Amino acid sequence: MGQSPYESQYESRHQSPYESPYEFPHQSQHGYDDGSPPWTRRRHVAVAAALVALVLLPVAVDRAVAARIESRTAKAFQEGMGTSLPPEVHVRGFPVVTQAASGPLRQVDITAHDIPARDSTRPLPVSELSLRLHGLTKSEDDSEAWARSAEATAFLSYEDVSNALGLEISRGARPGQVSAVVLVPLGKEVTVTTTLSAASGNRIAFRNFQVTGGVLPGAGGALLDRVFQQPIRLRNIPDGLHLRSVATTGDGLTVRFSGRSVTFRPEGGSAGGSAGT
């Protein structure tokens, strides 16, 4: 049968250039256009940019507050401990603004280098001190600061230990053991070993002396008694931190501390002769 005039007119009205009854969107040189006016698209972009700014602005403000606290803490620590360079300070947790406004800082990490000793006899500097402070608050006049609890790790080089004891100290054959070289008459050397242990008052004690090389005369034994009889004290440690363990490494000693109600004071204001920040 032939096509009726009505069917022909219907198809001609609904026929598209794409030979489909569906109308495709207009395509520009940048892709398909959704048909919305340009000002609508610009408004969508502006709203998206405003939302991004609302998200990033608090982060930037918080980072600025944290940076200020870190800078002030580093300066106070440097002045209190007498280091040549300010330590690395990181305030942990987000947001820092609410922590600073409401009370203690959740966690503050401090890493300092080359902390000088203030003991007139057998001074032993600390090559590196890493502190992790929990619940840090300060007094209104900035004269003191307190940490609810803290852990610390100090590194003492064999060179500094040797200078403090007056003997050449190196790593021993066993864990926690060091070797010392003692000069005896006729230019000979005797090697002795001693085991390190943590003693009260943040002191490193020496025990279990053994001669491992050569013959030690009576005078040499008396010398060792003078050197090792008294533990050596670490005086440049904040109040409230207590020595827990001493370990030997290839380059020096690793000393670990922990404590509660750890107090930081300016130089010279620390009780018991230990330094603070």
Image: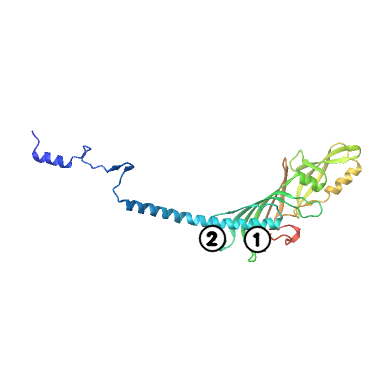
Q: Amino acid at mark 2?
A: Thr
Where residue 108 appears, as percent x and y from the top left, is: 61, 55
What label does residue 98 carry, if any?
2
Residue 63 makes an appearance in the image: yes
**Residue at the disc numbered 1:** 146
Number of numbered tags placed on the structure image: 2
- How is the rendered protein coloured? rainbow
Q: Residues within 10 Å of mark 2 (few under 14, many from 20)?
A: few
Name, please, the residue furthest toward the top: 1
Left or right relative to 188: residue 231:
left
Where residue 12 appears, as percent x and y from the top left, is: 15, 40
Secondary structure of residue under mark 1: strand
Where residue 185 appears, as percent x and y from the top left, is: 91, 39
Taking depth in this image into account, of 41 and 70 the one nearest to the observer is 41
Left or right relative to 258: residue 8:
left
Q: Residues within 10 Å of mark 1 (few under 14, many from 20)?
A: many
Q: Residue 68: name its quadrant.
A: bottom right
Name, please, the residue furthest toward the bottom: 140
Q: Earlier in the sequence, mark 1 or mark 2?
A: 2
Say whether marks 1 and 2 touch (CB < 8 Å): no
Taking depth in this image into account, of 19 and 170 the one nearest to the observer is 19
Residue 238 makes an appearance in the image: no
Where residue 26 appears, as percent x and y from the top left, is: 27, 43
What label does residue 170 carry, if any?
none
Residue at 85% x, 38% y: name it.
Answer: 190
Q: Residue 4: name its quadrant.
A: top left
Which quadrant: the N terminus? top left
Which quadrant: the C terminus? bottom right
Task: From this view, report whether residue 209 is shown above or below residue 151.
Answer: above
Q: Amino acid at mark 1?
A: Trp
Secondary structure of residue under mark 2: helix
Distance from Cα at disc 1 to Cα at disc 2 = 19 Å
